[in-house]
């Protein structure tokens, strides 16, 4: 598409014309250019039989050159629009040596909003009780904005803030976003203090409960103990 931006007859009656022609497929018939909101650049080719100057009223719109003559490329470059809701506009003014001007409207769409970041699951309650020398039962309530890929408890005799890299009891995936989960830890060592946390994992990461402790001892009969009435 080739569009005349400026056309004027010389004051002295000369048959030559002072003109500026901008050529680009995306330049609309009303002399408007649209740029992408995430940062964009588009190139015009300016042809003139006189010198010309270019200016813009917007700090966010950068011009590759501010003057020229003959056939010359003029690139319009816009930084990313900080607004994800509204379009912003600028005016490109091209002025010939004969002081004839024509305005080109340059619009930039809103920037693409960042993707929503989901929170890691929250653990609101956590209970833990020994049921015998080597076994403890637990229950906890978790909530999540998106699907749960794993949940359970993690525990350690040496790490005071255990993670899923320590020993754990996994209850696996869950379809419910809010659930009261429960299970048991088996094969604990006797006479040992354990640090225990409930956990739940989704695509954003793992959320943990506060730390509870249990200490096993030899006073509670285990399932393998011989108890004499």
Image (cartoon, helix red, strand yellow):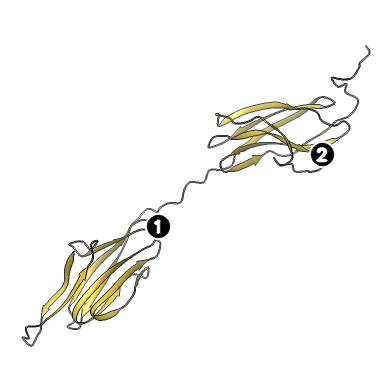
Check if mark 2's residue and mark 1's residue have beta carbons within 8 Å.
no
The image quadrant where one finds the C terminus is top right
Against 227, is 6 above or below?
below
Residue 157: assigned label = 2
Question: Residue reaching furthest top?
Answer: 229
Question: Residue reaching furthest front?
Answer: 71
CA distance separating discs 2 and 1: 51 Å
Tell me which corner region of the image, top left, top right, bottom left or bottom right, holds residue 100.
Answer: bottom left
Give me the residue at 28% from left, 74% from top.
73
Q: Which residue is mark 1?
A: 83
Tell which of 19 and 141 is nearer to you: 19
Q: Earlier in the sequence, mark 2 or mark 1?
A: 1
Tell me which corner region of the image, top left, top right, bottom left or bottom right, holds residue 170.
Answer: top right
**Relative to residue 69, is residue 84 drawn left or right?**
right
Against 73, is 177 above or below?
above
Q: Position of residue 46 (x, y in %)?
A: 23, 74
Give me the residue at 54% from left, 34% from top.
147
Question: Residue reaching furthest bottom?
Answer: 12
Q: Position of residue 168 (x, y in %)?
A: 72, 35
Q: Position of residue 42 (x, y in %)?
A: 31, 65
The image quadrant where one finds the N terminus is bottom left
Against 29, is 221 above or below?
above
Q: Position of residue 5 (x, y in %)?
A: 18, 71
Counting labels gives: 2
Against 11, is 82 above or below?
above
Neighbours of disc 1 within 10 Å: few (<14), some (14-19), many (20+): some
Tell me which corner region of the image, top left, top right, bottom left or bottom right, holds residue 144.
Answer: top right
């Amino acid at each position: 598409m080739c569009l005349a931006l400026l056309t004027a007859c010389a004051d002295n009656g000369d048959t030559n014309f002072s003109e500026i022609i901008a050529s680009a497929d995306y330049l609309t018939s009303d002399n408007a250019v649209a740029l992408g909101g995430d940062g964009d650049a588009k190139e015009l080719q300016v042809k003139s039989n006189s010198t010309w100057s270019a200016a813009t009223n917007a700090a966010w719109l950068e011009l590759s050159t501010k003057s020229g003559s003959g056939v010359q490329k003029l690139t319009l470059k816009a930084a990313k629009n900080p607004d994800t809701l509204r379009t912003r506009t600028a005016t490109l003014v091209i002025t010939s040596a004969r002081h004839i001007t024509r305005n080109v409207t340059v619009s930039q769409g809103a920037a693409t909003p960042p993707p929503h970041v989901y929170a890691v699951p929250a653990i609101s309650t956590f209970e833990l009780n020994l049921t015998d020398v080597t076994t403890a039962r637990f229950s906890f309530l978790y909530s999540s904005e998106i699907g749960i890929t794993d949940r359970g408890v993690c525990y350690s005799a040496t790490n005071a803030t255990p993670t899923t890299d320590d020993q754990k009891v996994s209850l696996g995936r869950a379809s419910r976003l809010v659930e009261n989960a429960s299970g048991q830890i088996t094969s604990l060592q006797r006479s040992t203090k354990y640090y225990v946390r409930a956990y739940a994992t989704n695509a954003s990461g793992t959320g943990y409960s506060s730390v509870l402790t249990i200490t096993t001892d030899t006073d509670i009969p285990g399932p393998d103990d011989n108890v004499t009435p």
